[in-house]
Image: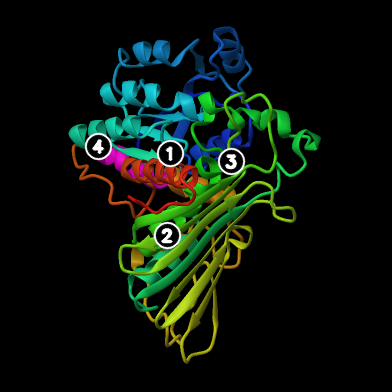
């Protein structure tokens, strides 16, 4: 029997935290990937100790530079096949650049970098070397996100007139009274988080959901970034905890892309509504198994993962590749970890193609690309400038 070699994955950062655990589960989900080494902290001693405390033996490095130097000198099959970067925002660019230059595919947490110029540099590297790069926009991994994309891009809703894409949380509403507040305060430091807290952290998810599902781009925007919770350690001004942009789309439609971290009553509420000339759809991450569709002149639909279609006069066909993405039978709930797993699974396909010289480049249909990361950074930069200028319209 022909068995695929298990891919070796290296970790950079993420010695603790829920994102770390989600990625670890995703890596192991299919039995075709495993963590073999890690540089888990910027503190060399903590990095080595965290690796020593791993649930099974892995090679621990004191830094990602040490990991890269050691791994590229190992024989093929023993060295890492791709690296996962799960550090705070300011520590994305340097390791991504160095591993790409060494020919090692990269899966990186978002946002892509701190600055647009850094994102442009990574785009150039990826495009020149034709190497796989995935930006971890988790929610694209939900099967229902992909179904929504298929419906919109198959023109079943007609020309898109309006999109409302939002991501609302409440973790900053109580400030330091929140039990997990101390673990997330790095997001409020400009030197670590960048020029926008709320927009960069979760507003980019709302933007990516819009772009992924509709295929539309933002041509111009007017933004208001607000701070309701002043965090006094930022002497040169506080970062936003409430982020609102009104956008003009490249098809002539309009959109709201908004985010909040002070929205009491919301937990992890990413949602999108797409309104077309012949119908609309709604999707919410907290009910990620469900996609609501409202065709004009036809009964409302609620689709769940792997829908039964023979009697449906609206959604009459699904591509086989979309049907093949189900890993468990219809009626068994998927969720957040499955979305992570689908991203790693799709990235693995491209990593293996790259190793066999059959890689043609990512088309953005399976996961967010480095170009998507650049689009997110450009969006944030323009939103900040717009807000600083009283909501002035800015072209992208």
How busy is the neighbourhood of tag 3: few (under 14 within 10 Å), some, or many (20 plus)? many
Residue that label 4 marks = 354
Marks 4 and 1, the one that precedes in the sequence: 1
Q: Magenta residues? A: 345-354
Residue that label 1 marks = 32
Name the secondary structure under disc 2. Answer: strand
Name the secondary structure under disc 4. Answer: helix
Q: Is residue 77 above or below residue 342?
A: above
How busy is the neighbourhood of tag 1: few (under 14 within 10 Å), some, or many (20 plus)? some
Q: Nearer the viewer, mark 3 or mark 4?
A: 3
Marks 3 and 2, the one that precedes in the sequence: 3
Q: Is residue 352 above or below residue 256?
A: above
* Residue 228 picture quarter: top right
Q: Nearer the viewer, mark 3 or mark 1?
A: 3
The spot of residue 147 in percent (x, y) is 44, 66
How busy is the neighbourhood of tag 2: few (under 14 within 10 Å), some, or many (20 plus)? many
Q: Residue 353 in magenta? A: yes
Residue that label 3 marks = 240
């Amino acid at each position: 029997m022909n068995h695929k070699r298990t891919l070796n994955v290296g970790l950079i950062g993420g010695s603790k935290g829920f994102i770390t655990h989600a990625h670890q589960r995703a890596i192991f989900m299919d039995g075709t990937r495993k963590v073999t080494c890690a540089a888990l902290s910027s503190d060399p001693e903590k990095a080595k100790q965290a690796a020593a405390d791993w649930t099974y033996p892995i090679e621990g490095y004191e830094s990602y530079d040490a990991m890269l130097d050691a791994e590229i000198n190992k024989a093929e099959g023993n060295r890492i096949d791709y690296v996962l970067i799960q550090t705070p925002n300011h520590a994305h660019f340097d390791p991504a650049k160095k591993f790409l230059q060494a020919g090692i595919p990269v899966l990186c947490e978002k946002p892509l970098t701190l600055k647009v110029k850094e994102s442009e540099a990574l785009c150039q590297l990826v495009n020149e070397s034709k190497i796989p790069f995935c930006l971890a926009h988790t929610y694209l991994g939900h099967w229902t996100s992909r179904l929504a994309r298929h419906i919109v891009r198959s023109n079943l809703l007609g020309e898109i007139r309006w999109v409302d894409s939002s991501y609302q949380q409440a973790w900053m509403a109580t400030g330091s009274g929140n039990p997990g507040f101390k673990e997330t305060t790095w997001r409020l430091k400009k030197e670590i988080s960048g020029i926008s807290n709320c927009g960069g952290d979760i507003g980019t998810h709302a933007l990516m959901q819009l772009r992924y599902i509709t295929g539309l781009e933002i041509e111009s925007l007017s933004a208001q970034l607000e701070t309701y919770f002043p965090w006094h350690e930022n002497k040169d001004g506080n970062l936003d905890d409430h982020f609102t942009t009104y956008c003009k789309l490249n098809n002539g439609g309009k959109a709201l892309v908004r985010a909040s971290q002070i929205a009491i009553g919301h937990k992890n509420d990413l949602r999108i509504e797409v309104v077309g000339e012949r119908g609309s759809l709604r999707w919410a991450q907290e009910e990620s198994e469900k996609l609501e569709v409202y065709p004009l002149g036809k009964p409302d639909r609620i689709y769940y993962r792997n829908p039964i279609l023979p009697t449906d006069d609206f959604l009459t066909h699904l591509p086989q590749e979309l049907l093949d993405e189900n890993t468990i039978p219809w009626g068994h709930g998927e969720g957040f970890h499955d979305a992570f797993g689908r991203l790693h699974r799709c990235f693995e396909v491209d990593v293996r193609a790259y190793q066999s010289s059959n890689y043609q480049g990512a088309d953005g249909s399976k996961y967010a690309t480095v170009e998507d990361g650049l689009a997110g950074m450009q969006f944030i930069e323009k939103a900040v400038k717009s807000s600083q200028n009283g909501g002035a319209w800015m072209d992208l």
